[in-house]
Amino acid sequence: MASQTISTAQDAGWIWDICLPTRRGVGYVYSSRHSSEEDARATLRRYIGPQHELEARKIPIRSGHRRTFWKNNCIAVGLAGGFLEPLESSAIVLVELSAKLIAEQMPANREVMDIVARRFNEVTLYRWGRIIDFLKLHYVLTQRTDTAFWRDNVDPATVPDRLNELLKLWKYHPPWFFDEFDRLEEVFPAASYQYVLYGMGFQSEVPPEATADTELLASRLREENERQTLELRSRLPTNRELLNKIHEYGLQPV
Ligand SMILES: Cc1cc2nc3c(=O)[nH]c(=O)nc-3n(C[C@H](O)[C@H](O)[C@H](O)COP(=O)(O)OP(=O)(O)OC[C@H]3O[C@@H](n4cnc5c(N)ncnc54)[C@H](O)[C@@H]3O)c2cc1C
């Protein structure tokens, strides 16, 4: 039983495959500009395999977000504020962060409400922007040129300016805190960018003077990491064993 969501790139999007104790949740997020509904259904059927006779439900996505989330005494949270696509599971964390902000900053009176609203709008807009950057990162690093969907996705005109600048900087150093990931509750910190960037084979040039020492240190860290991974794997339960335990006894304090 896979312990992670398996996302597989397709001709016009990607398929998610989430393993649950008694079934799998599978869906195809596709661009309707690049695939007909019929082709998308056929792709999904192929992925699932002919042995399962399943009908897919269609969920149309109107991608985008508001510019103003708090206006007078109304605040748009969750789907009321926007939706992009489910690749990075960022919607619920935004709901939580917004709820926290509202609870902690609830205006004491009408006089300060506009100040709180302006600050809420500013930080929420910032967060949506960062989610767009991070989503786009997955697409823009693709090596695929076989379909129009993937070719269109690397078109520089579709890459946000901030991400474009960061990608230029990251040729010379890995994503780090100074790359403006400086908010207290950043949805995707520098480490998240590192996972996607280097997972997709991106190369950052190491400065020549650092090479020998850095390589030695890096190989030691890699070895140590592998050793620890093997050790932990031999002691940890499988995903199904863990889920069965949680089902039976609830989540135990660590
Ligand atoms: C395929 C898919 C996968 C996703 N995966 C993830 C994920 O892994 N992680 C993540 O964070 N987010 C994910 N999301 C996004 C996330 O599910 C939504 O952003 C989130 O559920 C939105 O919450 P909400 O309360 O704003 O809206 P909803 O959950 O849609 O709640 C709105 C509620 O209002 C009710 N309602 C509507 N109209 C009325 C009315 N007139 N009167 C009374 N009630 C009404 C509806 O029935 C519904 O219960 C995914 C979304 C999709 C489509």
Image (cartoon, helix red, strand yellow):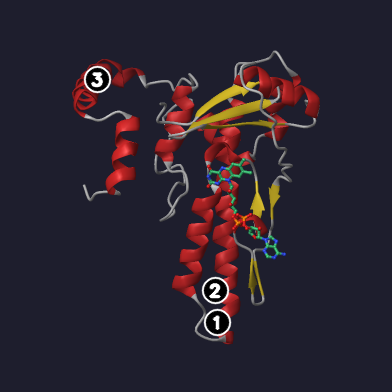
Residue that carries the numbered disc 3 in the rendered image: 226
Residue 132 lies, with reference to residue 139, above or below; the image says: below
Q: Which mark is residue 112?
A: 1
Where is residue 12, by image quadrant? top right
Query: Considering the numbered disc 2 on the image, is that residue within a helix, a strand or a loop?
Result: helix
Residue 232 lies, with reference to residue 162, above or below; the image says: above
Residue under the point 47% across and 48% down: 187
Whole-angstrom CA distance, mark 1 to mark 2, is 6 Å
Specify few, some or many for label 2: CA neighbours under 10 Å numbering under 14, 14-19, or 20 or more.
some
Specify few, some or many for label 3: CA neighbours under 10 Å numbering under 14, 14-19, or 20 or more.
few
Q: Residue 49 versus residue 8: which sits nearer the camera? A: 49
Asked if the residues shown at circle 1 and circle 2 are in contact, with their CB atoms under 8 angstroms apart, the answer is: yes
Q: Could you tell me the amino acid type at mark 2?
A: Val
Give the mark nearest the N terminus, 2 or 3. 2
Whole-angstrom CA distance, mark 2 to mark 3, is 48 Å
Residue that carries the numbered disc 2 in the rendered image: 116
Q: Could you tell me the amino acid type at mark 3?
A: Glu
Query: Can residue 162 be spotted in the picture?
Result: no
Q: Quadrant of the N terminus?
A: top left
Q: Is the CB atom of the residue marked by disc 1 within 8 angstroms of ligand 1's nearest atom?
A: no
Q: Position of residue 20 (x, y in %)?
A: 46, 35
Query: Can residue 64 be spotted in the picture?
Result: yes
Which of labels 1 and 3 is toward the front? 3
Q: Position of residue 210 (x, y in %)?
A: 29, 21
Q: Residue 154 versus residue 187: which sits nearer the camera? A: 187
